[in-house]
Image (cartoon, rainbow, N blue to C red):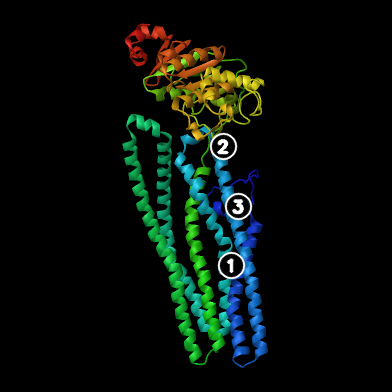
Amino acid sequence: MIDAYEDPGTPDHRGGARYLWWLVTRQPWRCAAGAMFGSVWMVLLAATPYLMSRAIDDGLEPGDMGALTAWSGALFAVGAFNAWLGIMRHRTMTRVRMDANFRTVKVVVGQAVRLGAWLPRQTGAGEVVTIGVADVQTISQSLTVVGPGVGAVVAYLAVAVLLVSVSPLIALVVLLGIPVIVLLVGPLLGRLQGSETEYRERQGVLTARIGDLAGGLRVLAGLGGKTLVADAFRRDSRRLREQGYRVGAVTSWVQALGIGLPTLFLAVVTWLAARLAAQGDITVGQLVSVYGYVAVLVGPVSFWVECGYQISRGLVCARRVVRFLRLEPMPDTGSLDAPAEPSTLYDPESGVRVPPGRLTALVAEHSADATTVLDRLARYTPSNATWGGKRLDEIALAQIRRRILLADHEADLFAGTLQDMIRPVGGAGNGATSHNAPADATPHNTALQTALHTAAAEDIVQALPDGLNTPMAAQARNLSGGQRQRVRLARALLADPEILLTVEPTSALDAHTEATVADRLGKARQGRTTVVTTTSPLVLDRTDTVHYLVDGKVAASGSHHELLDTIPGYRALVARDTEEAVR
């Protein structure tokens, strides 16, 4: 079975069916073993009625106790062996399903990592969660067809051969009747795929809404928006429930027909065999064997219906996985080297020019305009932006990522200790150190303390019971919004990139803490390029250059005080009161 470190292979994402087949080909010997165990197990189930008929005809009816004992012993041996086969079949198919489950999880996680920052721009978090939680289970369950499914086909053919030796008429009825049952269920499986597809789509939407609600509950409460979001959640939940009822209705018919039709068919064949026995065309033992054969066939037919049901659902989920695997990150066609020396970043679309070694601020009427500019300067969206006169899309992406860091004020914080949250294992910094080492024991921890000081985050560490070693929840939900923002800023500062682009780094801080961060940020980044998006006069007053954006274009540039004195729109946007405007 695939382990945590094994390469899952390259998935076939040409279609849902091809993806399922790829999962089978990743474990061919195990699937073959499952098919063998399933086939022999079902065939021996069919052998039981044959042995019973011989025990009746050769031993019980003529009174031959030796023959009766021999056939009874054979029946016991076959039953015991078949019980062992059943255990092996179940164990093997469990491994098949688990391998498919874990392999799908690994390729989905690998694709999410490959997309990186490009992922949120192409699909929602709810879609990824739904795939990882629900779809992988359904996909793995659909691989049941390679074990009991193959065994059902082999058992069906074996029983047909045995029935020919008893009565060609009964064999003909069985051979024609079973396919008719499968065909009757077929249209329902097609309808199930459509209903299941819509259900999965709605489930992804609702999952995304749950994540948004959980992540922003405190903000929503402060803004009085809980009722609005709760109403939207109830509406989407009601739609999902109604779609689930539709899926359940189709599923109930599939499962009812899968059990009811074979049982009805069993009654018809038993009646026909009884008529032939009454007419003397078959013996009593053969009558018992026919009943047993048809009773055994109920299992394979039910397996066929069940496999059809599982495959239909598996195809729906596999298509969703394939659609996710087809997503591509921004193409890395760059082959040029990045500028050897600190150089100017320039975005022609907005007119923003970022000189090297200076602290630059972007002020926009709509904050999304400033964020869009940073996305272009960090090469997270296609643009004509340049770095040292070279187009960013012509520079090797790996070099850009090593030297330019875009720090979002809502960037993810991963669960772990506070130290791991600020310095991910194997991430930025001067090297890994023991969590039990004193804070000033290594150059790395000195850099960590400097980053915490610049972000005014020392009080966070001091307030926690175990300091930097305190376990933190995902997204640091056990911290306040301002504390989380300072932790994110400390993480970005610890990375110490040549060019740091930050989105609203102090928006959740009180005025005193914001002024402290603004003072320390300029000193800590002295001689290195830093860009902030903000409308805070406390931060703007400490920058070298401010670009004022209107409709995404630079309307004016200069120092904070120059723009206050000359640009009314800028003054109205950033001045928090008259006295600040005058200053």
Amino acid at pointer 2: Arg
Q: Is residue 35 visible?
A: no
Judge left or right: residue 348 versus residue 157.
Answer: left
Disc 1 packing (10 Å; few <14; some 14–19; many ≥20): many
Percent across and percent down for residue 306 are 49, 63
Q: Nearer the viewer, residue 502 or 114?
A: 502
Residue marked by disc 3? 99
Residue marked by disc 2? 114
Please say if 76 is above or below 239: below
Residue shown at the point (49%, 92%) measured from the top left: 279
Q: Nearer the viewer, residue 171 or 284?
A: 284
Could you give the CA–CA distance between mark 1 and mark 2, rounded to whole angstroms?
40 Å
Judge left or right: residue 525 versus residue 7.
Answer: left
Amino acid at pointer 3: Asp
Which circle's residue, 3 or 1, is located before the other in the chain? Answer: 3
- As helix, strand or loop, the secondary structure at mark 1 comes to helix
Amino acid at pointer 1: Gly
Residue marked by disc 1? 151
Percent across and percent down for residue 478 are 48, 32
Residue shown at the point (57%, 12%) measured from the top left: 527
The C terminus appears in which quarter of the rendering?
top left
